[in-house]
Image (tube, rainbow, N blue to C red):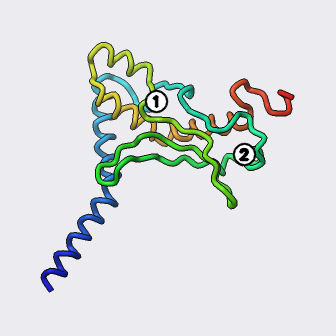
Amino acid sequence: MTGFSVIVATLVFVGFLLLSSRFFCFVEMKSVAVRITKSLGLNIVDLDYSFEQIVYFVSLPSNIPTLKNAKQEDLVIKLDYRSLFFPRLTGIKIFIKTEEENIIISYLPTKDFRLPVLDQILEQGKINRDDYLKISTYKLIHQTTLNEIAEESYKQIRLGRNGKTVSEEA
């Protein structure tokens, strides 16, 4: 009976680690990001960024019926993590999810998500690369930023990079 108890306890422990590792990683990232930005006199929500680094996998605007008929509610953002035990966010995937299919439309790698104000502070030596990555990653997964990225992606599906619909380009 003791061997069975050890196996069950081990499985419960591993299960707890797997289920809680992303949460504790997020809590640590948030606390570090908030502490550092406060010490620099910055507000994370107010930091500017660019949509230029989003990599689109479909031509925009698109004639694909699923994309053409998609509503903004069909747009889903999924955080892309590497590793289960010590998760590291590698980017965000943006896709259209319908009842019939899921189409990935774009991806934004974490390492390419740049914040100009933080770039200047990094150059001045006031923060290191690890702090930069934690702050920019927290900014990337902040709900306000995710909503803005979803709106921009939907706009790109509808209008494309030059701001014209498919019918206007023809």
* Residue sitting farthest toward the left: 2
Image position, residue 98 (x, y; %): 67, 56
Residue type of the residue flagged with mark 2: Leu
Q: In this view, does 128 lie above or below 153?
A: above
Q: Rate crowding at label 2 as few (under 14), some (14 to 19) or many (20 or more) other CA atoms within 10 Å.
A: many
Q: Residue at x 49, y 24 (%)?
A: 48
Q: Which of 128 and 103 is in front in this view?
A: 103
Which residue appears farthest toward the top when viewing the image?
124
Task: Name the residue type under label 1.
Answer: Phe
Image location of residue 82, percent across then percent down: 38, 47
Relative to 73, say whether 47 is above or below: above
Give the left or right position of residue 138, taking residue 6 as reference.
Answer: right
Helix, strand or loop at mark 2: helix
Find disc 1 in the rendering and name its residue: 113
Q: Observer-nearest residue: 34 or 28?
A: 28
The residue drawn where x is 28% and y is 33% is 35
Q: Is residue 110 left or right of residue 31?
A: right
Residue that badge 2 annotates: 67
Which quadrant: the N terminus?
A: bottom left
| Residue 165 horizontal/vertical position (percent) | 79, 32
